[in-house]
Image (tube, rainbow, N blue to C red):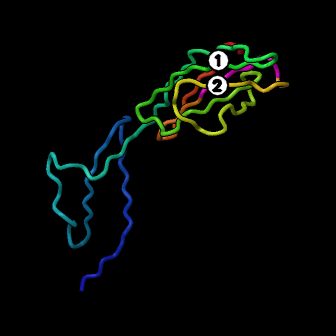
């Protein structure tokens, strides 16, 4: 009687460049292949995307406006692009100097809306650098920092 067993398989394939690679896997043992070998133009069963390129991020605007007697708001505009961008790819942060430490504007990763209005904290200083980080599905990360403090 034939008994089915679950067997884990591992294979390694070296590739030269980023891109999309398609595979059809044929397992073979002492009894031969588990099915006929694929023919040219057979559809792939598994697609692997190799991505080592970080997202491109640019801060296009960080404008301060008065919102009350002693409060201001910072209108942050940015672009973040990547072919394989993560579902919630954006993190915004600020610091007093570019060396850090960086503190969160968004407490978690957020949608790539291209804008954020932020009310800076009081008592930490009057000028801040702003950083926008973006990640892709492969967890590559790109970032942009305001050139001058806001």
Name the residue nearer the viewer: 122 or 101. Answer: 122
Q: CA distance from mark 1 to mark 2?
A: 7 Å
Do the residues under discs 1 and 2 have CB atoms within 8 angstroms?
yes
Left or right: residue 136 compared with residue 23: right
How many residues crowd mark 2 within 10 Å: few (<14), some (14–19), many (20+)?
A: many
Q: In the image, residue 56 lies at what x, y percent? A: 49, 25
Residue at image position (77%, 17%) is 68
Quadrant of residue 132 within the rendered picture: top right
Q: Tag 2's secondary structure? A: strand
Magenta part of the chain: 125-132
Left or right: residue 51 compared with residue 71: left
Q: Which residue is mark 1?
A: 146
In which quadrant of the rendered image does the C terminus lie?
A: top right
* Residue 119 magenta-highlighted: no
Q: Tag 1's secondary structure? A: loop
Residue 131 circle label = 2
In which quadrant of the rendered image does the N terminus lie?
A: bottom left
Task: Look at the picture and state if 37 lies above or below 94.
Answer: below
Q: In the image, residue 119 lies at what x, y percent? A: 72, 24
Residue at image position (64%, 17%) is 146
Q: Residue furthest front?
A: 68
Quadrant of residue 59 within the rendered picture: top right
Left or right: residue 123 compared with residue 24: right
């Amino acid at each position: 009687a034939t008994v089915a067993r679950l067997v884990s398989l591992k294979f390694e394939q070296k590739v030269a460049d980023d891109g999309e690679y398609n595979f059809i896997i044929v397992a073979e043992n002492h009894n031969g292949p588990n099915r006929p070998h694929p023919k040219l133009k057979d559809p792939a069963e598994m697609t692997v995307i190799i991505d080592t390129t970080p997202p491109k991020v640019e801060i296009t605007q960080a404008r301060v406006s008065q919102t009350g007697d002693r409060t201001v708001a910072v209108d942050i505009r940015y672009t973040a692009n990547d072919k394989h961008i993560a579902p919630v790819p954006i993190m915004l942060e600020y610091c007093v100097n570019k060396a850090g430490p960086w503190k969160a504007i968004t407490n978690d990763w957020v949608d790539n809306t291209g804008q954020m209005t932020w009310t800076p904290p009081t008592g930490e200083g009057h000028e801040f650098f702003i950083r926008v980080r973006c990640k892709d599905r492969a967890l590559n990360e790109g970032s942009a920092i305001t050139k001058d403090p806001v």
